[in-house]
Image: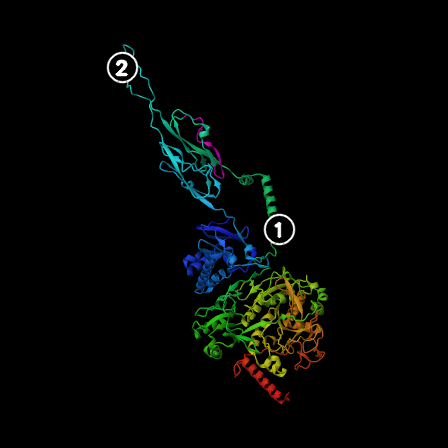
Amino acid sequence: MAAHTFRGKQRLCYTEVNDFTDFQGIGHDPLYRRYDSVLSVVKKVVPQHLWHFLATPDYLEDSDQICWYVDQWDERPTRLNELSGQELDEYQELLKHTVEAYKMAASELDGDDLQIMAGAIKYADSGQVYCGDGKVYLVAWGMKPATHRHKVIGTVIHDYDYVKKFKVRFDAGAHGSIAPLDRTVSLAGGTTLTETEVPQVTVHEGWTLVGWLPDMPVGQVVNADMAFTAQYDQCPPPVPPHVEDCAPDAGEENDGADDDYKEEDTCYNCRFEAGEHGTLNGPATLHKAAGSTIGSNEVPAVTPHKGYRFTGWSSSPVNAAVDGDKVFVAQYERVVPWYKRWWLWLTGSGCLKWLLWLLLALLLGLLLIGVLKGCEGCTGHHTPVNGVVPADTLTRADGSMVDDNGYARPVTGDDGQLPDDEMIVAPVMGEGGSEPPIVEQPGAPSIMANRLFLFMEEENDNVEALARDFKRAYPGEQYGIIGYDKEVKLLVIQVPEAERNHIRQTINRRIPGHKFIVFDEEVYELNGQASTQSEPAGWHLGAIHLKQGWACTKGSANVKVAIVDDGIQAGHPMFRGRIVDAYNVFTQNNTLSMGEGHGTHTAALAAGSADYYNRGASGVAPGCQIMPIQVFDNKRCPLSALVAGVMYALHHNADVVNISIGPSFKGLNVLPVEQQAEIARTQFRNVALLWARVCQLAARKRAILVFAAGNDDILTSIPPENRNASSIVVTAVDPRLCPTSFTNYGPGSDISAPGKGISSAFPVNTFKMLDGTSMAAPIVTGTIALMKSLKKDLTVAQARNVLYRTGAAVYGNIPPMVLVDKALEAVRQGNFSAPAERAITPVPGGAGAGGSSQANPIANPAGNMPPPTAATPQPAGGTDYDAIRRKIAAYKQKIEELEKLLPHK
């Protein structure tokens, strides 16, 4: 595809798209594809004399290059880093002034306009700046050089060869004319003028072209702008022929004839016309005496235009007798290209031609198949990779980058009417990537300081009516509905921070027509961290008897494994051909980020490729499909997003859903187990009720939810999502089959799996060992996927019974460890009977986290923490978090009293 021509612009340089990364963009389009939008924003706020700063991009699709244009120049612009001395100082000062002007202009913008401006000026290396004619230009803006390929930015910006051109003007003078397009020609310096560049002059009647001033153009070397003026001579007046005087013979009288009569010597104009499809090379007009003839050397040559052939003149001028003014018009015929002649032949009739058509169609089909195969796995900015589009990024006011998942905003008008979507999730980040107000709470999950969660108690209640009534009760703009789920029956509202506590206590009275629970919007964290010990890579694969299990099945492509997490590196080789129905709950499309690598790691553990088994990394169910669902917005996952992610999985027919995400209760392990058990019985019952409804919806769809137990070394039953019998909760063991130092334990735990030093996929295209119940959960998720490959309608209760009964004995107060081969054999035999309770085996060397000294051992594999059947009112002293703080404070006081009784050192 040829480059465009921009009025008043001149081509300066070009860049290769694959030499750059981190393309700033609008939606799915990089800024260089949306220059009109960029220029529109610039013209809104930037002074006009600085509009030129961002060079004009022209994307050449065929070559995947960007051509950069700047204002037409007198002297070719030079790169800033090639200047020196005073000139360098002057242009550096000009660049500083220009960038400051753009940044100041950006401060006046908001929303999409701010994103566009910030993205455009994010990268401005000196190697990208050109200087000339008192101006500075920024090329390759809105992108960053791929430093893994090129260490120096100058190596990725390519200058076009530049030859200075000069204008040569031809003036027809007073007695002739030149066609307007032929009056000026631009030629490269050093060019020698030939007859081809000299235009044809149409001479006025009575004049003859005799040359040019200041000199004849042909042979002149062009080293500057030049001008030539045509010169003429007037044709001489007619001269009568000479007649000798003859005296009359004697005796003859004069007949009265005029002795002064002389015959005229007449001249005629012979004009040559080029016609519509060519040009003349030579004089267009001849002045010939009457009775003379036109020689072949006097006839101008004809150069036909492209696509035409000169065939002769309207009448032959060679040796034509000049007996009056004559006009000779050049004649042409259209040249039909070979391929058009071929097309005309093909589109005619005939059996042979139809056979050729059939052969051509077959060849084109084979070519298309080859192209499509060659494109498999191709990557590029905003190009889907394995069904996933890489996420956009946003430049904040301070210049830092964040993932662009949108920002929290009201989804209704003043009438509270919800949109038609089944659910909308509010992102964590504010407008322009601003940080949200987060309240950190030691010993309890962090919460959003300006949001509340309204959860309807009755499953058949009308959440849309609740939304309308909320806006009637709270009509101001400061009160907005920013998220909802029509099936789960919940609203997420945004309120002023200072009013949150008061609204939480009074909103039920303000909206009396509905029964709903009010609690804070929790913010969840990831349950996995880099391994600090050098466990043998892949030890977990042998521990769970994975290869022995594969003798039964490696999984069915009809089984979908949903991974609700922080995103995924879809291009990792462990996911080739496995990803389906990818989804981002915030953007409501398949645009996902890679997050921190947590989702990549867990997805590969559950159902990644088995090709890397010998390297210690493999999916448990490599034959199943993976459904990645992003619920994290820049390292934070709101409770509403996690619920929405699970619901998306259920609506898209996921068979098993892995949830390696949960609230943090770090520090509660200082409390005695008895007090922890009291917290599990009395606190966060409203959130437990929410998860009970979600798990019940999953059970109706024959989907199994698998939760990571948590990494806080506390009772598994404290996190409220772990308190029901409609899901599977997984704790973690180390290579000795002892509880890991971090795993939660005790009531609420259903099965354990390796969670220490677990090797799996990690961005970018590598592998990493991580620790956490986050790693244990997807091992069980993959096992259940294999079980569902044998029995599609497997229930939660059946899966729990099989896993517990066939699991390997472990130490401490945690359930057995999953054994893949034993579990699959039980499913194949149809043995889903309830297992007998297992005794606890003490941890060798003494009790630790999950050790035998812990109270409340696991009473049965089905769990003993049924969900509440009704909402729990807020504690008299405040929230669930306040009750926990009081328990911690009382326990610390007891410790201080005991310390006082100890002897002094």
User: How far is the residue under mark 1 from the one under mark 2?
Assistant: 106 Å
Residue type indicated by callout 1: Gly
Q: Which residue is mark 2?
A: 254
Q: Quadrant of the C terminus?
A: bottom right
Residue 19: x percent and y percent? Answer: 56, 56
Q: Residue furthest front?
A: 85
Q: Is residue 285 visible?
A: yes
Residue type indicated by callout 2: Asn
Residue 472: x percent and y percent? Answer: 43, 73
Observer-nearest residue: 847 or 674? 847
Circles 1 and 2, Cβ within 8 Å, touching? The answer is no
Q: Secondary structure at mark 1?
A: helix
Residue 126: x percent and y percent? Answer: 51, 58
Give left or right: position of 460 versus 269: right
Asked if 634 appears above or below 903 in the picture, the reply is above
Specify whether residue 482 is painted magenta: no
Observer-nearest residue: 130 or 140? 130
Mark 2 surroundings: few (<14), some (14-19) or many (≥20) residues within 10 A: few
Magenta portion: prevailing SS class = loop
Asked if 377 appears above or below 840 in the picture, the reply is above
Quadrant in the picture for residue 443: bottom right
Residue 638: x percent and y percent? Answer: 54, 71
Q: Secondary structure at mark 2?
A: loop
Observer-nearest residue: 570 or 195? 195
Asked if 324 appears above or below 140 in the picture, the reply is above
Q: Which residue is mark 1?
A: 370
Q: Residue furthest top?
A: 251
Mark 1 surroundings: few (<14), some (14-19) or many (≥20) residues within 10 A: few
Residue ID at (32%, 21%): 262
Q: State the extent of the magenta-drawn residues as a range.
A: 304-321
